[in-house]
Amino acid sequence: MTTTPVAAGPSRPITVRRHRDHDPAVADIPGIDLGPAEVTGPVGDAVADWHADGVRKLVLPGVVDLTVADPAAAADAVRRLVLVREATSHAIEIDWSVRLPGGDDDLWRVYGHLRPPVAVELVGADAATSAAATTAWRDAFYFDKCTYRQGPGFVQVRDRRTGQLNLLTIDDPAYLAVLAQLVDGAPVTGVDIDIAREFGEEGLVTKVGDQLVWLPHRLRRWPLPSMVI
């Protein structure tokens, strides 16, 4: 299948607040609050730089709205979701909120490998149902729930979001090329839709408006001794 490249428009800046420690008890100590930062370029690069500089907590204002249809709003929502994914990958705590489509009270589980938000809003659901989703996400979260590691010529995904380990190895160059496109998010019209659909069927890709984005976060160190894994 031949795809037509889509020119990327200017990205909306993302403003976050950075902290050296996630413990509220030390939040007022001089030097812990590093102040705001604005992301205008690649999100992954910014988060990696913050981690290297000692940032261990981020606060992302507003709501990551995964229900939007407008192309510009969808691209912005995907960039914010990527920021949450990359913060999770670097073990940086992040305060964020998310709005999810209604109709499935357990939809949060698709995103349950990401740092739990402070609030989940399920469109059309009552406050108690949304609050229950927030609590369930927080209680079910652990660090390596859906991750990937990259080797020479392959990517291996370890997905435990269903409660069982689903181990996937991707080594087809065409599939790896689509994965690379989707790490930062891409329009549906800019990728091989058949491959993207297969990723979606495995729960590895989600769609926001006209955007697709890769969900697993990169595993940067084993959270348990290798003999346990």
Image (spheres, rainbow, N blue to C red):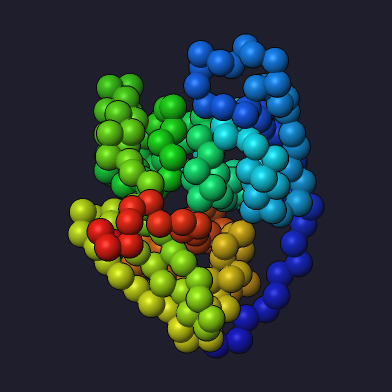
User: Would residue 210 be visible to someone looking at this image?
Assistant: no
Give the quarter of the image for residue 59: top right
Residue 142, compared with residue 167, is above or below; it is: above
Give percent across and percent down for residue 44.
Answer: 64, 53
User: Would residue 13 be visible to someone looking at this image?
Assistant: yes
Give percent across and percent down for residue 89.
Answer: 50, 50
The quadrant in which the N terminus is found is: bottom right
At x 61% / y 63%, what residue is drawn?
186
The quadrant in which the C terminus is found is: bottom left
Question: In the depicted view, which residue is nearer to us: 43 or 80?
Answer: 43
Question: In the depicted view, which residue is nearer to us: 48 or 43?
Answer: 48
At x 69% / y 53%, what residue is drawn?
45
Give the quarter of the image for residue 157: bottom left
Q: Residue furthest left?
A: 164
Residue 85, compared with residue 134, is above or below; it is: below
At x 63% / y 43%, what residue is drawn?
51
At x 62% / y 81%, what residue is drawn?
3
Give percent across and percent down for residue 213.
Answer: 53, 59
